[in-house]
Amino acid sequence: MLHISSSLSRSAGGLYHSVSGLAKAQLSQGADVAVLGGADGYFAEDRHVWGEVPLHHFPQRSVYAFHPAAVAHLLSSRPDLVHLHGVWTATSLYGRLLSAVGIPVVLSPRGMLNPWIVGRRRTIKQVHAALFERALLRNAHVHALNEAERAAIRQFAPVADDRIFVQPNGIDREEIRPSVGRRTGTLYLGRLHPTKQVLELARTWASSPRLRGACLTIAGWGDAAYERELRGVAEGAGNIEFVGPLYGAAKDEALAKARALVLPSRNEGQPMVVLEALRAGCLPVITDACNCPDLIQQGAAVRMKQDFSDLEPIIEGICGEPDEVVTERSRCLTAHAEQYRWDAIARAILDKYEAILNAHRRRDHAGAPVVSGR
């Protein structure tokens, strides 16, 4: 079984951790798993996150991530099943090709079929969808991260409705040990991109008289021009610290020290950083576009408006809580994260692969299509 992602490094954003986490968990359960994708300038530094998962990597010269050698490898190896992660890149092209030669395909759009994303650069996407995504979705089984994404996929491709199944992202078994001392401050952690509204967050924070006594730490990386503008706002604010990208133990420590993680995104599939915050006992403050309504309903996250109009009272309330309240909530958040363990999620997806392959074998044997349910 082969996973395909456009990039195998941090350039993939959330897919870097979600695809590697799933592949490693499936490998640990004895599955025959490999991953194919692009290798850019960060790949050598980021290879370790994949652990022992076999990787087939090809030079990634653009965001689209097409390489002829990848096509040759796919056609010669002919995997039993392929699991695609993301759309609007060469990943969709590869999936369309493999589907055409009779290889079962599972597609995880990872939030990229949500209306806000589909509406950006609409003309280009209409052409690409006509060539690849819509044709692919006529036969592929589709993995949605939650019910909101299921609805978005159904809206984009009603024909795929009876082949959509839902499984969330997961987190590793390792625990993040809270640092000694009290939790303080608010953290943004992730890609620096307009979709995440990081610059708007920094400007709102810097201009708010009510947040002058509150500290915001911004950790991440992104486009150089966007990062420069963000650094400028942080340097002029006095209560915003920009620390650049954090990985591994440094990222875990930041989550273990912060009272809250703020993620004011315009679009997400299911953000990995929110699950990592839960595991660390750090309270997520998220928009509806983060697609985690269950966490908000269960009290494991706080809802904020996408226009930042309620940011001040939310942060004031969190900063004003007694330490003992914060400590108890952190314990509850860590316990809540147990339901997102990769091992159980990987097992459920492996079972889905087996059901798809069995239906494929029956179809080949009978010479007629098999209609499969969710």
Image: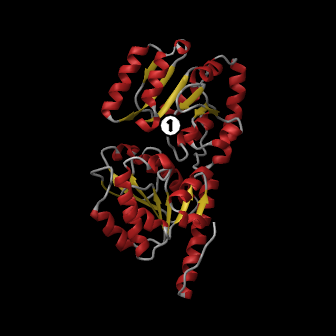
Quadrant in the picture for residue 233:
top left
Does residue 337 show up? no
The front one of 169 and 140 is 140
| Residue at image location 40% in from the left, 29% down from the top | 244
Which residue extends farthest bottom?
366
Q: Secondary structure at mark 1?
A: loop
Quadrant in the picture for residue 241:
top left
Against 280, residue 160 (above or below) is below
Against 65, residue 80 (above or below) is below
Which residue corresponds to mark 1? 265
Number of numbered markers: 1
Q: At which x and y percent is residue 76? A: 35, 73
Q: At which x and y percent is residue 315? A: 60, 22
Does residue 209 show up? yes
| Residue at image location 49% in from the left, 49% down from the top | 115
The amino acid at mark 1 is: Ser
Left or right of residue 8, residue 159 in this image = right
Label 1 neighbourhood size at 10 Å, few (<14), some (14-19), many (20+)?
A: many
Left or right of residue 238, residue 255 in this image = right
Colour scheme: secondary structure
Left or right of residue 328, residue 274 in this image = left
Left or right of residue 321, residue 312 in this image = left
Q: At which x and y percent is residue 303? A: 62, 33
Quadrant in the picture for residue 313:
top right
